Image (cartoon, rainbow, N blue to C red):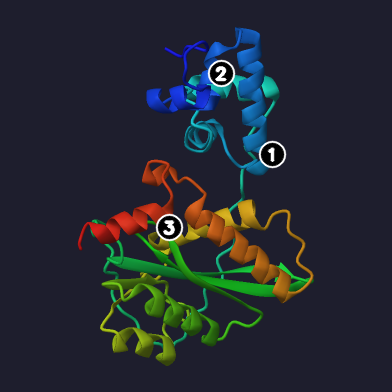
Amino acid sequence: MVEPSSGLSLNRQLTLLGVSKSSYYLATRPRPDRNAFLKHLITRVYQERPHYGYRRTTAELSVKYEVDVGEARIRTQMRQLGLRAIIRRRRIVTTVADPDGRRFPNLLQDLRLERSNQAWGSDITYTAAGGQRAYVVSIKDLYSRKVLAWRVSNTMDASFCVEALEEALRRYGRPGIFHSDQGSQFTSKAFVKALEAGGVRISHTGKGRAADNGQMENLWYSLKYEGLKHVQAVNLAELRQAVNRYFIQYNGDRPHSALGYRYPNAVYKEGLDSVA
């Protein structure tokens, strides 16, 4: 137990007991004050990430503030505060196939993801900058959900996709499988050549099976809803800055429920260490 009159400082006692300051203050306050303190922390999380429901808020409090509180209590406090996660809307799919592009079978069916760099995925979405249409491509490690590389462009040619791929290969090595839809950028000669030169097995989502690329779709929902919803980029440079900020935060400071509320950067590293 913590003893204020002992010769050790409060910080030292809490460190030895493995108790965080937030949990200590929460436990030692009278119940009205404890609830007020907890609501203060919940409000702080909500102001930063209004898309979080009670489950993600509970995880954020545990990871960021080391507060050990159950989901039921967080749900009750959020209800009393009138805080509700803002639900995102699904986007319109605009994949355009190239009749002359090369196509490959779907290698992800029944594949169990067990390590980093086992399989990467990629996709393109659209947004806007200065009232003009803009496009974002990203390359993602499907095991850890870490976004490895990305590019923003105002055109839909394959060059910005090839640039993102080359950066990912240069920084992270090569995956066993690279998966995408059958869009013209991913079936282009330049893109396929870059993959085959590295000995990467190519995988494509089957025609009419957009759900097979679901993890990439989820990434776009998160980017648009969490990262760009309140951004009014007046030009491509500002949009690039916003996308950069979000993906850096997504990799290192956004807990994922599918990862046990851990961060992609940490899971990616663990996934590499497991096969070292």
Q: Residue at x 63, y 56 (%)?
A: 227
The picture places residue 207, in percent across and down from the top left corner, at: 39, 71
The picture places residue 110, in percent across and down from the top left corner, at: 23, 58
For disc 3, the marked residue is 215
Name the foreground residue: 229 vs 183: 229
**Separation of marks 1 and 3 at Cα, in angstroms:** 26 Å
In the rendered structure, which amino acid carries the disc numbered 1? Gln
Residue 138, compared with residue 17, is above or below; it is below
**Depth-wise, is mark 1 or mark 3 nearer the camera?**
1
The picture places residue 29, in percent across and down from the top left corner, at: 60, 12
Name the foreground residue: 150 vs 41: 41
**Separation of marks 2 and 1 at Cα, in angstroms:** 21 Å
Label whose residue precedes the other's in the sequence (2 or 1): 2
In the rendered structure, which amino acid carries the disc numbered 2? Leu
For disc 1, the marked residue is 47
The local secondary structure at tag 2 comes to helix
